[in-house]
Image (cartoon, rainbow, N blue to C red):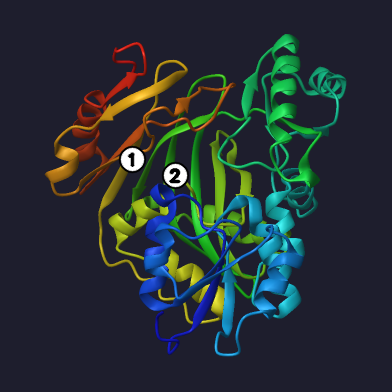
Amino acid sequence: MKSNVRKTVGLVGCGSEKYRKYLLEQMSDEYDVWIFLTEKISWQSNYICGYSQIDEYTVESLEKAIKALSPDIELSGLVCWDERYIIAAADVSERLGFRSAGSDGIRGCRDKSLSRSLLAEHGILQPANRLCFEAKEAVNFAETVGYPLVVKPRGMGGSIGVALVRTEEQLIARFNECFSVSQEGASDFQNCVLIEEFLTGMEISIDGFTVDGSYKPMFVARKRVGMHPHFEETGHTVSSHDPLLKDYGLTQLLCDAHRAINFKNGITHTEVKIAPHGYVIVEINGRLGGDLIPYLASLAMDIKPGVIAAQVACGDKVTYERAADKTAVIEFVYPVSDIIVDSVHLPEACNNVENIYGEVLVNSGDKLALPPTGYMSRAAYVLMVGECEEEIKQPINSLLSNVIVYSLGEGKIVA
């Protein structure tokens, strides 16, 4: 057990070791961490002062567990970076007097249809959109606005279930796929699909923090997508000197959007399209970015997003100062078809060359299924840090081409 001299922050859920360990490690450097999980702790044990095993991630279970803590464990705030549990974490925080996004603010993130309505009410540019409960409604909407369109679940993250459609036949097929995927999410957001006008242009994401309703961007990630007509996120670039960090128009849009949804305190990951007619909000997520994006920022800028999340939750002064001026690029490795994994082999440079990182994300026997059968089916990633993206592009592509994935039972390279 750690000393309880420092403030203690509660963490609701955690995520997988390969994707979220660095955040917990950062947080534990400056705070004692008490974690709330439905499963028993495993790898997290080295970074926490204690844990509560709860029945489910609900307000009631969390409140019961927090009130059952011994008197010498005094939580100063709650953090949650798992999309599935952010509503429960925000609601219990508000109920118990911790700083939070607020019940309205967190729903303005989680519910993509509500978010669209709130942004539109505040005069923020929006694509034409409609929440549809049946494929027929989607077809009627398409007849009004035309194609191409995007279908997306009302309350999922990570581009899961999102697809581009150009015809009525495609719309009906993708609607049904998306409707099915929505059943895997929170019950409040099931049985419906959000249909939106498709916007051309580069997509970026911005992680920022809000304190007492005042928003500040931290880092920008430039996204790469693939697996058309789906929008699988295959890679990201984070640069400490990205000019978009100094773009007043973008910052003002983000500030206005967070006020529109009444987001009070916390971290957000906002996705934005740089469309021909200007910046357009794709969605606001009430958590730190996934896909190791905050890790890229840690390497490129020498900041600690895990600590910042705790500082905001606990009402402490946020220490956000860029101490490095680098660029970090990550590329994810996918199979070329649905497979059962035999083994994955990374280039030797991923293990012993400075500023080059690699990680196998699967075990032998795991199934990797591509959209629409499965999503985020990554075999591995390679990551590189350098002075600028131009310096990194060629060597990281070379690394990527030398990652070998074998399919179980077939004995052949499939990626």
The residue tagged 1 is: 330
Residue at 48% from the left image edge and 48% from the top image edge = 290
Residue at 62% from the left image edge and 22% from the top image edge = 164
Question: In which quadrant of the rendered view does residue 24 lie?
Answer: bottom left
The residue tagged 2 is: 291
Q: CA distance from mark 2 to mark 1?
A: 9 Å
Q: Name the kind of residue labelled 2 in the image.
A: Asp
97, above or below 108, in the image: below
**Dot 1 lies on which element?**
strand
Residue 225: percent from the left, percent from the top? 47, 30
**Dot 2 lies on which element?**
loop
**In the rendered structure, are the residues bearing label 2 and label 1 in contact, judged by CB atoms less than 8 Å apart?**
yes
Q: Nearer the viewer, residue 185 or 248?
A: 185
Residue 13 left/right relative to 42: right
Residue 71: percent from the left, percent from the top? 60, 90
414, above or below 121, in the image: above
